[in-house]
Image (spheres, coloured by chain):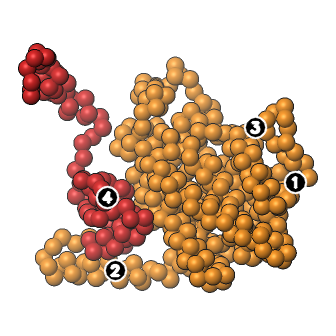
Chain colours: A orange, B red
Amino acid sequence: MYAQMVDTGQKKVRSLEEMPPEERAFQQRIDADVKVEPKEWMPEGYRKTLIRQISQHAHSEIVGMLPEGNWITRAPSLQRKAILMAKVQDEAGHGLYLYAAAETLGVSRDELIAELHAGKAKYSSIFNYPTLSWADIGAIGWLVDGAAIMNQIPLCRCSFGPYSRAMIRVCKEESFHQRQGFDIMMKLCAGTAEQKAMAQDALDRWWWPSLMMFGPPDAESVHSAQSARWRIKILSNDELRQRFIDQTVPQSEFLGLRVPDPALAWNEGRGHYDFGPIDWEEFHNVIKGNGPCNRDRLRTRVKAWDDGAWVREAALAYAEKRAARNGERAA
Amino acid sequence: MNRSEWPLWEIFIRSQHGLAHKHVGSLHAPDAEMAIKNARDVYTRRNEGVSIWVVRSADITATAPGDKAPLFEPANSKVYRHPTFFPMPDEVKHL
């Protein structure tokens, strides 16, 4: 989701009998819902997959600050500005919790950042779309954070202790994000005709990319089975996507907005909404680096890192100098 | 690890109504003063704490998960450390 299409490096899911004894004991603990903690033995595939998944999630939070940060200077009121800043601060915090969780698996922060900046690490496709109006801030809080919550709540139960604890903390903070977005949408939809049209336009542009956040259909998700076996993926892409649609359509009806899907219809027999085909070509193209904002997002991140190098170095030099002067141990 | 990377610190917060500092996570900072400032920004945005402890991760010694069984074995056979091991007659009060 925020971590889409995470490569597990495994060709097939093995049965308990096929596993060597150490791995079998590990799998049995996972099956018994016992949490795995950092210094414990774990299969190399589990460790690598988690590093990939958690770091992708972390990168998504940090890059995700950019589309919303774009509107801080143009929020319609001081209160909206302060609230948006608080949300963006939270995203930074979420990224930090997740980097900290990834580091417990034996990888350094700098390594992870270098992979993002070199274009080797992925982040969620959704953040490669531009924020064109204030209504986009409402749509993002409502739909993008809504989709994130859909994925993150089950992850609170995942098998890796630090990741599950980070998710619990994130979920507590995330629901203000979604409410903030819906609050903006309600205000716009109850406003002038232009404001409501702006809200509809935002929904028109953010609906399908939000559905793509859940990743490709289950039938095409080759790595999902292993991730599910390791309990680092709790619900399938299609299941999460269906739940999100079922819960969001009534919200759009309350707003008096139209979901941009002519095939959207309640299916009484299924007890779910039927919906139209998703343009997976667009999704894969964005993941490959050809979305509207990919290059801009990466350039902004690299510049921030490079421009801040002197601050990091100065802080360290100052700390070392002061420690030496006090006869203390340096960093 | 890159020599210029800020060291890792573990963060402990005591909440308003709690008695003990709880481990909430980690962060990077060049020194203790920045670690406290960063901990305030990262881990107490919602009034989660009245007190912050920061400890260099390198200074924490922890038990190895694999040693759990032998390390804690002595307590397993000493059930008499619990008061319930000693049933008391009903008519005796204040015991």
Q: Would you say A130 lies left or right of A324 here?
A: right
- Is the same chain shared between marks 1 and 3? yes
**Residue A228, located in which quarter of the rendered image?**
top right
CA distance for labels 2 and 1: 52 Å
Check disc 2: other Cα within 10 Å, few if <14, some if 14-19, many if 20+.
Answer: some
Amino acid type, callout 4 = Ser
Residue, x 26% and y 71% (percent of image)? Answer: B32
Say above or below: A32 vs A281: above
**Quadrant, the C terminus of chain A:** bottom left
**Can residue A95 be seen in the rendering of this structure?**
yes
Tag 3 and tag 2 share a subunit: yes
Question: Judging from the image, what secondary structure is the residue with disc 1 in?
Answer: loop
Name the residue located 36 percent from the left edge and 69 percent from the top edge: B40
The chain holding disc 4 is: B
Does the image show residue A119?
no
- From the image, tell me which residue sits under label 2: A315
Residue B94 in the image, given as x and y percentages of width and height: 9, 28
Of callouts 2 and 1, the N-terminal one: 1
Amino acid on which disc 2 is placed? Ala
Task: Give the CA distance from mark 3 to mark 2.
Answer: 50 Å
Q: Does the CB distance between marks 3 and 4 fall below 8 Å?
A: no
Rendering coords of residue A186 (x, y %): 72, 66
Query: Which mark sits nearer the N-terminus, 1 or 3?
Result: 3
- Locate residue A38: give its quadrant: top left
Q: Secondary structure at mark 4?
A: loop
Residue that appears at 58% across and 73% down: A84
Q: Amino acid at mark 3?
A: Ala
Identify residue for label 4: B15
Q: Residue at x 39, y 78 (%)?
A: A312
Residue carrying label 1 = A261
Q: Is residue A130 above or below residue A317?
A: above
